[in-house]
């Protein structure tokens, strides 16, 4: 008998228990163990019904994702589910935690399902670039109909036990937390009442009733807008539609064909990489799991502007009290009013209640005095990017904050060590770089200074988790990981326009790759003045920063969305960029002033120059140890800049394109275009020479 699946009889019920931590995923040992336990149950004359139940924190959470891309070992999951469904003894699945993907498909192969109130069910395969491949697309519609099945399978969203009961996915929901007891009681009822074996594959009423309905085409049309570049949501619709067109066995065959198409798609590889990278990124090399963390029960935030307000909301959302500091009452009032408006908008959409709005607002205490920071555990400074101002603030914090308080800066580019030098406690100083809008974007780039203490590093990573962000720990350099790469892309994109491309051509290449917006639409969102101010500071510091047509926009007061005009025009209340001929004229004038004869630029050149310059910078970031692993860079870009997760992040994407191909092109650009940004990173050169990938590091 397998160790991960056991069989034991309790009274008249044969209990099949899965125990395969952490989430009872359906690896090979579990699949074969399930078949062996089923066989035992069938042969056990005393067993009148069988119960499938799991140990640990959850019911089966799906196929074992680590096995994807490797040769499949028999038995496959569809045949395990089929064997359960074919049993002549009734089988009951008792669900706790989350029954997901192949886990829910196993439960659908059972004849009855009972769930704890706290349980959730879902078919999240689409989030991994897949579709349910063990009958989920054929069985769920037979219980829940077309609409519910399409919603669940194309979104991957989970349903609560109560919703699952309403939709016919489970047969009963019970309170309490002893799932085995609940399952045994249900099984005994099945035996006592002589309930029949009820095979979902034979329940045809719902699929017959909705045969030929127009819902599938409507659904595809709706997905065109939502699925932005994704492949598998459309395959999910095809598979569910098959349940309404074909007999069960043929529908299963169709599901398998579509499943294999998804399995072989590069999008599946990218999404699975992103799934594991998101989990791996919290395990920081060199920072042991048992590193102590400091208590964070109160947070002080300096600056009630867009950033500071958004950061404050993150803490209030999870019940952590915040003191929000501004220098002027007017700025404080304005900041609080914006926070309230944001919460009220969320309440209007039904995502929180009005009582929660008040609870969260009550957790944000406004202040004009640093004295209120005397007892906070963590301070996050979120004022504008000016080293002088930041150093002054950190000098004050050093005087007023209690020993052991963590002093963090939300700077997006500046030197953490220089900020720390304004204090007598550099070990307590760290960067916590939130991304705008800070209450929405999931990334938190935590930046270590050269003296940041290990427990401070561990604490800011733990804080990220608490406020439901994905924390990435990175080293200190100009722009850290994300902005350092972004600035290279921005500079190259601007040059491409100097040379003859239009901003909209550059943006289209990036959105075609899967970015939610292009470089210039993003500049408009962030504010053209942000980059302008940084360039001006660098010029003042004596750096050779070439003139740019973007400077002209800033000087004309075209600051982006906030002035309804930047690189693009924006209608009142709209965020949709509209091409403005005036900008074309401004660019033409700039080219003339600079003596540039514009040339036709291909989309391929735009792609290579915008992306490879980032990859080359990413390689430099890795060789300098600013990011510990290629996957850290990938997660920064997926969660901070909307890099399409289905491409796995920039470094994963680079591996797919080919490191050698990228190295050769970077070298060619270095020879033809020149500039430090095109000097091939030593790491890129080494990997290309050795035929290795970033993922192999
Ligand atoms: C599928 O089922 C295909 C079938 O239709 C067809 C087959 C023919 N496999 O997220 P956490 C690991 S596709 C392997 O931190 P939480 C995870 O890596 C699958 N490993 O915990 C982590 O490992 P580590 C459909 C898995 O409590 C640990 O478990 N199912 C799997 O925040 C804890 O995970 C899904 O897509 C897996 N399936 O959330 C469900 N799942 O400790 C994916 C997790 O080494 N999973 N691990 O870092 C989830 O959504 C969440 O993990 C879950 C728990 C909600 C279950």
Image (cartoon, helix red, strand yellow):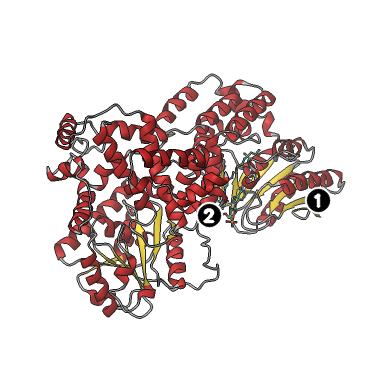
| Residue 108, quarter of the rendered image | top right
SS state under label 2: helix
Q: Residues within 10 Å of mark 1 (few under 14, many from 20)?
A: some
Compare marks 1 and 2 and give the one earlier in the sequence. 1
Residue located 37% across and 32% down the image: 605
In the rendering, at what x and y percent does residue 168 appear?
58, 38
In the rendering, at what x and y percent does residue 182 appear?
67, 54
In the rendering, at what x and y percent does residue 123 appear?
57, 40
Q: Pointer 2: what residue?
A: 279
In front of the other: 589 or 628: 589
| Residue 368, quarter of the rendered image | bottom left
Q: Pointer 1: what residue?
A: 12
Query: Can I make out residue 337 in this image?
Result: yes
Residue located 66% across and 44% down the image: 67
Query: Can I make out residue 127 in this image?
Result: no
Relative to 480, is 515 above or below? above
* Front disc: 1 or 2: 2
Establish whether ligand 1 lies closer than 8 Å to the Cβ of label 2: yes
Residue 52, labelled with which disc?
A: none
Left or right placement of residue 159 versus residue 303 in this view: right
Q: Residues within 10 Å of mark 2 (few under 14, many from 20)?
A: few
């Amino acid at each position: 008998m397998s160790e991960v699946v056991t069989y034991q009889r309790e009274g008249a019920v044969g209990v099949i228990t899965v125990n395969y931590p952490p989430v009872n995923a359906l690896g090979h040992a579990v699949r074969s163990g399930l078949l062996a336990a089923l066989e035992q149950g069938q042969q056990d004359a005393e067993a009148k019904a069988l119960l499938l139940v799991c140990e640990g924190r959850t019911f089966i959470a799906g196929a074992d994702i680590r096995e994807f891309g490797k040769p499949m070992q028999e038995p496959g999951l569809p045949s395990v589910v089929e064997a359960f469904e074919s049993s002549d003894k009734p089988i009951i699945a008792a669900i706790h935690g989350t029954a997901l993907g192949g886990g829910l498909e196993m439960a659908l192969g059972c004849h009855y399902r009972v769930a704890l109130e706290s349980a959730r069910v879902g078919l999240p395969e689409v989030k991994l670039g897949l579709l349910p491949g063990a009958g989920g697309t054929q069985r769920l519609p037979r219980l829940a109909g077309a609409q519910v099945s399409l919603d669940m399978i194309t979104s991957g969203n989970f349903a609560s036990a109560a919703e699952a009961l309403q939709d016919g996915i489970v047969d009963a929901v019970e309170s309490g937390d002893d799932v085995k007891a609940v399952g045994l009681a249900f099984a005994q009822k099945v035996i006592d009442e002589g309930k029949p074996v009820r095979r979902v594959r034979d329940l045809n009423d719902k699929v017959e009733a909705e045969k030929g309905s127009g819902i599938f085409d409507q659904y595809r049309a709706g997905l065109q807008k939502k699925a932005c570049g994704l492949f598998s949501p459309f395959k999910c619709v095809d598979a569910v539609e098959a349940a309404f067109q074909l007999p069960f066995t043929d529908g299963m065959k169709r599901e398998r064909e579509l499943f294999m198409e998804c399995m072989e798609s590069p999008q599946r590889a990218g999404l699975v990489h992103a799934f594991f990278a998101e989990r791996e990124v919290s395990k920081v090399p060199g920072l042991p799991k048992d590193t102590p963390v400091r208590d964070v029960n109160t947070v002080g935030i300096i600056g009630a502007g867009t950033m500071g307000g958004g950061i404050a909301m993150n803490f209030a959302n999870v019940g952590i009290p915040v003191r929000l500091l501004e220098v002027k009452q007017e700025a404080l009032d304005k900041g609080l009013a914006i926070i309230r408006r944001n919460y009220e908008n969320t309440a209007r959409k039904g995502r929180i209640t009005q009582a929660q709005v008040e609870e969260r607002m009550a957790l944000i205490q406004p202040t004009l005095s640093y004295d209120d920071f005397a007892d906070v555990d963590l301070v996050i400074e979120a004022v504008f990017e000016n080293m002088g101002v930041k150093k002054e603030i950190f000098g004050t914090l050093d005087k007023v904050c209690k020993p052991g308080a963590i002093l963090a800066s939300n700077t997006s580019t500046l030197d953490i060590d220089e900020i720390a030098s304004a204090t007598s406690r550099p070990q307590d100083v760290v960067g916590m770089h939130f991304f705008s809008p800070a209450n929405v974007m999931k990334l938190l780039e935590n930046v270590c200074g050269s003296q940041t203490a290990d427990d401070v590093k561990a604490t800011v990573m733990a804080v990220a988790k608490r406020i439901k962000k994905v924390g990435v720990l990175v080293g200190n350099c100009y722009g850290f990981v994300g902005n350092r790469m972004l600035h290279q892309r921005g500079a190259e994109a601007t040059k491409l326009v100097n040379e003859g491309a239009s901003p909209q051509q550059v943006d289209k290449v990036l959105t075609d790759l899967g970015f939610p917006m292009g470089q210039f639409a993003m500049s408009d969102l962030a504010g053209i003045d942000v980059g302008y101010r940084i360039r001006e500071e660098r010029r003042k510091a004596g750096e050779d920063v070439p003139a740019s047509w973007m400077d002209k926009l800033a000087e004309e007061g075209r600051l982006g969305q906030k002035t309804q005009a930047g690189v693009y025009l924006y209608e009142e209340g709209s965020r949709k960029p509209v091409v403005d001929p005036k900008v074309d004229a401004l660019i033409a004038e700039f080219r003339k002033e600079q003596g540039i004869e514009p040339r036709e630029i291909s989309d391929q050149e735009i792609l290579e120059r915008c992306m490879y310059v980032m990859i080359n910078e990413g390689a430099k970031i890795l060789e300098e140890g600013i990011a510990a692993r290629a996957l850290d860079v990938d997660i920064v870009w997926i969660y901070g800049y909307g890099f399409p997760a289905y491409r796995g992040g920039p470094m994963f994407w680079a591996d797919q394109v080919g490191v050698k191909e990228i190295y050769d092109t970077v070298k060619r650009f270095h020879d033809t275009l020149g500039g430090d940004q095109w000097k091939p990173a030593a790491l890129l050169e080494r990997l290309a020479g050795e035929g290795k990938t970033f993922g192999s590091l």
